[in-house]
């Protein structure tokens, strides 16, 4: 039987959490979603996540939470991450880091593996080769699952596209995150893997990547450091809906948008 996976792009601050709670139940019902995965790395005031916020997102209906380069931004989270069964850190961080390098999410007998890798171009966090990490973990994940979703948390579109083709036919879907701008390229790759360069963010779109516009414009003009508060207007949930066939490859992928 085919399964539907809803992947939700980077949840940004309180506005992102609010639109998630408001819109997710209706999306699940409307599209018959089986499993919900979301990137939560910007859930705490736009930078990082906490244990309590991860639990809040889980209660809102998200089955698996992924993280990115802001994984350690919130003080004390390094000591909390191992308490969260439904959350994983990027797999290509140093192996001594706490937290799970991937997730196995099971709903009604269907098991999906979820793994995130960080890109390298323009990224400020130390990470090993994304391809080597995937080569290491994917065989282990495949033994335990019916489908696999790979999230590529990267700045450069070239890295995301290259990894998409590298994984084509090996995993169910490759979805990019981090840049907060949804891309208009949902497609099936030649060997059956669903792909999107960036799922976009779940947060305020009258903003600069989720932050208030004016402080960022002013900083660009004069170079003086400023606080960049999370914006509040035009809040949207963005992501993609993936239909997975019985053979573990994708049948469809389409963008999802819901407005608060």
Image: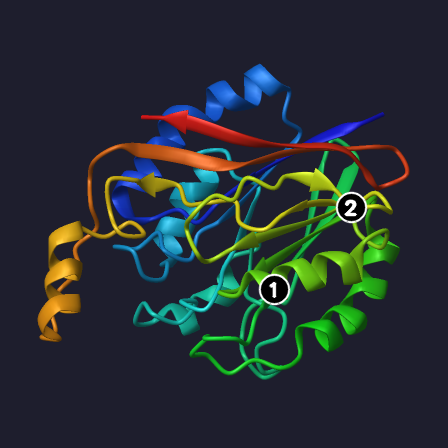
Percent of width and height locating residue 77: 38, 68
Where residue 98 sits: x, y (%)?
54, 75
The total of numbered circles placed on residues is 2
According to the picture, the residue beneath numbered tag 2 turns out to be: 189
- Label ID, residue 158: 1
Any part of residue 116 in sight: no
Query: Foreground: 223 or 230?
Result: 223
Label 1 neighbour load within 10 Å: few <14, some 14-19, many 20+: few
- Residue 57, numbered circle: none
Question: Which quarter of the picture shows residue 4?
Answer: top right
> Which residue is located at x 56 percent, y 80 percent?
127
Q: CA–CA distance between discs 2 and 1?
A: 15 Å
Q: Are marks 2 and 1 in contact (CB under 8 Å)?
A: no
Q: Is residue 131 left or right of residue 33?
A: right
Name the residue located 35 percent from the left edge and 51 percent from the top edge: 43
Q: Which residue reaches farthest right?
A: 247
Q: Position of residue 2 (x, y in %)?
A: 81, 27
Please tell me which residue is depicted at 48% across the width and 23% down the height of the picture. Answer: 25
Say how the picture is coloured: rainbow
Which quadrant of the figure has residue 240?
Answer: top right
- The location of residue 202, given as percent across then percent down, is 39, 41
Disc on the earlier residue, 2 or 1:
1
Secondary structure at badge 1 equals helix
In depth, the one of 26 and 185 nearer the eye is 185
Q: Residue at x 17, y 51 (%)?
A: 213
Relative height, residue 63 to residue 72 (above, below): above
The answer to whether one can see residue 149 in this image is: yes
Q: Secondary structure at mark 2?
A: loop
Q: Is 53 left or right of 66, judged from the image as shown?
A: left
């Amino acid at each position: 039987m085919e399964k539907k996976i809803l992947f939700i792009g980077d949840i940004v601050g309180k506005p992102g959490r609010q639109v998630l709670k408001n819109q997710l139940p209706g999306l699940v019902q409307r599209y018959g979603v089986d499993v919900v995965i979301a990137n939560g790395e910007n859930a705490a005031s736009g930078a990082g996540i906490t244990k309590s916020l991860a639990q809040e997102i889980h209660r809102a209906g998200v089955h698996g939470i992924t993280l990115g380069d802001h994984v350690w931004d919130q003080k004390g989270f390094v000591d909390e991450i191992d308490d969260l069964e439904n959350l994983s850190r990027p797999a290509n961080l140093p192996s001594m880091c706490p937290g799970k390098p991937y997730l196995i999410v099971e709903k009604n007998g269907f098991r999906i593996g979820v793994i995130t890798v960080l890109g390298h171009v323009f990224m400020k966090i130390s990470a090993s080769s994304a391809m080597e990490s995937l080569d290491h973990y994917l065989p282990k994940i495949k033994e335990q699952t019916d489908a696999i979703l790979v999230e590529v948390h990267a700045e450069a579109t070239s890295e995301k596209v290259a990894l998409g083709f590298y994984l084509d036919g090996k995993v169910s879907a490759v979805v990019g995150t981090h840049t907060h701008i949804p891309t208009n390229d949902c497609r099936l790759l030649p060997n059956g893997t669903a792909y999107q360069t960036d799922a976009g963010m779940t947060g305020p779109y009258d903003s600069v990547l989720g932050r208030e516009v004016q402080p960022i414009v002013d900083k660009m003009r004069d170079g003086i450091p400023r606080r960049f508060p999370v914006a509040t207007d035009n809040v949207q949930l963005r992501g993609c809906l993936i239909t997975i066939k019985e053979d573990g490859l994708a049948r469809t992928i389409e963008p999802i948008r819901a407005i608060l």
